Image (cartoon, coloured by chain):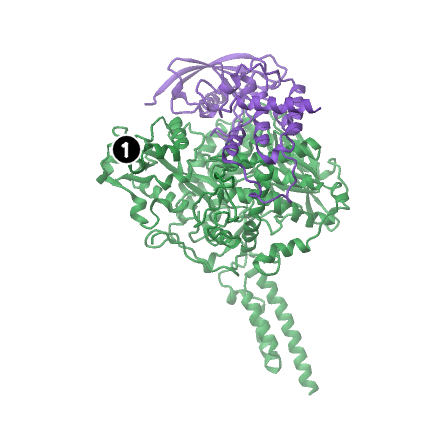
Chain colours: A green, B purple
Amino acid sequence: MAKKEEILDAAKKAAEVIKEKVEKVAERAEVKEAVEAVTEAAKKAGKAAVAAAEEIMAPAEDPKAEAAPKAAPKKETKVITPKDAKIPEGPLELKWTNYKNHQKLVNPANKRRLDIIVVGTGLAGASAAASLAEMGFNVLNFCIQDSPRRAHSIAAQGGINAAKNYQNDGDSVYRLYYDTIKGGDYRAREANVYRLAEVSNNIIDQCVAQGVPFAREYGGLLDNRSFGGAQVSRTFYAKGQTGQQLLLGAYSALSRQIGKGKVKMYTRYEMLDIVMIKDENGEPRARGIIARNLVTGRIERFFAHAVVVGSGGYGNTFFLSTNAMASNGSAAMQMYRHGALFANPCYAQIHPTCIPKHGDFQSKLTLMSESLRNDGRIWVPKKLEDAKRLQAGEIKGRDIPEEDRDYYLERRYPAFGNLVPRDVASRAAKERCDKGYGVNNTGLAVFLDFSEAIQRLGKDVVAQKYGNLFQMYEKIVDENPYENPMMIFPAIHYTMGGIWVDYELQTSVKGLFCIGEANFSDHGANRLGASALMQGLADGYFVLPYTIQNYLSDQIGVPRMSTDLPEFAEAEKRVQDKIDKLMAIQGKRSVDSIHKELGLIMWDFVGMGRTAEGLKEGIAKIDAIKKEFWTNVYIPGEANALNNELEKALRLADFIEIGRLMAVDALHREESCGGHFREEYQTPEGEALRQDDKFSYVGCWKYMGEDQEPQLIKEPLDYEFTERKTRNYKN
Amino acid sequence: MDSYIDIKVRVWRQAGPKAQGHFETYDLKHVFQGASFLEMIDILNEQLIAEHKDPVTYDHDCREGICGMCSMYVNGHPHGPDSAITTCQLHMRKFKDGETITVEPWRSRAFPVIKDLMVDRGAYDKIMQAGGFVSVNTGGVPDANAIPIPKPVADEAMDAASCIGCGACAAACKNGSAMLFVAAKVSQLALLPQGKVEAAARAKAMVAKMDELGFGNCTNTGACAAECPKSVSLANIARLNREFIGAKFKD
């Protein structure tokens, strides 16, 4: 008997050891099943278990071979668990409530002792800076423009989603959550998206209280419009200037706090590095930034207990995009180089209705509202010779008879026709232009035709609905869209990828938070229209001001630190060295000329239709560009003075790295989902083909050093509450 | 149909806030008329960089007429000869072959030149900080539909709110007055019930700040509204005056 018990005991111990070991490996190799299997085996302890355990013991040193044959052992792929991501326990609809009920707070007296740096003054940055200051924290807020009101959020046109259900059309928090998850092609975190939908209603209340003049109905209540990817009308809008009005609302709140002295505003300042200082346990924490005064060229140091970055997206990697000229990804790259993970860099949204490029001098692409596709019909000529004559300028669109027009969206997608989602419409346009049917002098445009709508509705109705857009088009292109079809072409518009953050919006670096478009966000692989404004303001007004307290609550004893500390000096030196290096190149090429070249490579190889072969070629070309940039760029003027070319060069150095990271991520993601389309993974009809069994995870990249390949870390997306489906727009 | 033109660009060059400025004329050949005005400046700058000269410093960002960053005085008009647009929306087809185009920064006492065409418009931010807001904190506000607002009122507030803060109004004004800018914000908020509560105090605070920062007085010449890229109406100034006088009577 006693012997039996001894054996049983030994077996149990052995099983425990195995379990521990396998768990360690499992963490690396993503083999939860292995853990479960061994745990099961351990339970059935006894003589047999001892034997079994002994047997298992040997292969336990290398269980990867069996459990995860594909995991490359050399790379040591780490897995981010829901616990690492700090996803709260409980049912979906209670997670945020539970979090708020149990999180740690900072009392008012202590708030006064804590400084927070907020970088950026867009919807996310301005709303966060204002809200944190209202709560009592001391905020230092930075922007590169001459005023916080100019951040690129201002250019958003369409609207902002919220689950108010004011239209009584069956909307709910759950429905907004579901549409967002589905629109993102099931590549977003369930808990985050649900929280986003939950706080969406507070945003509308807040904005109205600030005096944002949303559109109203004759009864005086708020009006809504419908937008892509939803069956309800949940989009609030202020003419075609919703982004402007929301940003001015946040800017007003921010101005009030600046006036009160709770926010110290630094305009025309650009962050160039983050300062990390180790705590008493030797763990590095973000404790400040190095920023360049863009007017004087002076490099300055700033301390804070925590750093929040809301610096927007990196669409300008493509040079031509709908982003503002100064929008850049450098803040993201600074975080990345300090160990913050860059998640899903390959997810970029290409908007189908932009005014096409018409020359090499082109500096940006102008977006035309998606709403035009409600009445406009998209087509190219059926005959190649017609396309050639159009490209040569010999004929105009209206000269081509009806029977010679190819309404390719209506042909390919009978059910949705011209109203297919953004990614689908963009790819279809590219397909036609690649085959030579493009209609601009460059061959890179398709027609958006209102002649049928004008016949059906009359010119006045069309003018009422779209007049301002038609006018904008005419100003830019100098052609009357009432008489001749408009020309449109896809352009990079928004980046869903960005810095990885946990549920608290904290990056993998302690004390460093990331909000708005700059983080990898709640949009998965594709963002729905009118959801960018929602996310930016949700992060800034209603999420970060809560979650950052959970971090700051144990920082109240940390005194303000001197910026004379060696960590600040070192960070400043790194920045200064980089600037000196750039200024010393004195090559032959302007910054823009190299940036334009990078943009073309991105568009051709990392654009709408990606292939393994093309991406590899793209990476080689980006590497060549990097070399060209660091040996042949020419920057005029002085470093310690106002110098736009130097500013652009610093940003371009990072765009080159981001471009490469986008290509590397796109190459590794062997599936098509949302904004990422790999030509090898499509249905016979040319539709995106997800590979849920292999790629249902967030692809996070860890910086491994200059010119080193980044390391892939996965955050599995286990859909606990929602069933994944395939998007279908044909029938 | 757009074609190519040769032009001379006469640009204000000023090395710094205290430096003496001067005009410099550059020849620019073969400029496509489809290019925007700022793209023309880009072309000029590429040419200057190739010659190892200092490129022209100017403010610009969104290039679609909404950020309010661009601020050029072109041939005697803020944002150039076309109406209801910003400089970035001006295209070279508005100019003729052989033409000399004069480009200057905003000229206004309250907007000192930083370099070349770039000016400091921080004064507008300071006016906003003095009262251009509704005093509500984040959270704890009523439901968005709790207070109905008549559609014409909301629309009028929206028109006033469309100001982009570019500074063209003050730059166009012979007195250098910021009245249209201030009036637009005061009107937007005074029209809406949410902003009405503080309307009088707001008008007083913003006007006082405007005076303090060196902006001139309004003599109703209307140049501001004529040059405003967003066509903000002069009626807003009348509304500001009503709010302001009302507030003074109460004192």
Looking at the figure, which quarter contains the C terminus of chain A?
A: bottom left
Badge 1 density bin: few <14, some 14–19, many ≥20, Cα 10 Å: many
Residue at x 41%, y 31% (from the top left corner):
A468
Location of mark 1 (residue)? A397
B182 relative to A63, above or below: above
Residue A562: % across, % down: 75, 37
Residue A152: % across, % down: 53, 34
Residue at x 74%, y 35% (from the top left corner):
A564
Looking at the figure, which quarter contains the N terminus of chain A?
A: bottom right
Q: Is residue A707 left or right of residue B244?
A: left
Dividing the picture into quarters, in which one does residue A513 lie? top right
Residue A12 in sight in this render: yes
A155 relative to B20, above or below: below
Name which residue type carries label 1.
Gly
> Secondary structure beneath disc 1?
helix
* Pointer 1 chain: A
Closest to the observer, B237 or A157 = B237
- How many marks do you count on the picture? 1
Residue A120 in sight in this render: no
Residue A609: % across, % down: 39, 45
Q: Is residue A441 left or right of residue A129?
A: left
Closest to the observer, A606 or B103 = B103
Residue B197: % across, % down: 64, 33
Residue at x 43%, y 20% (from the top left corner):
B82
B207 relative to A150, above or below: above
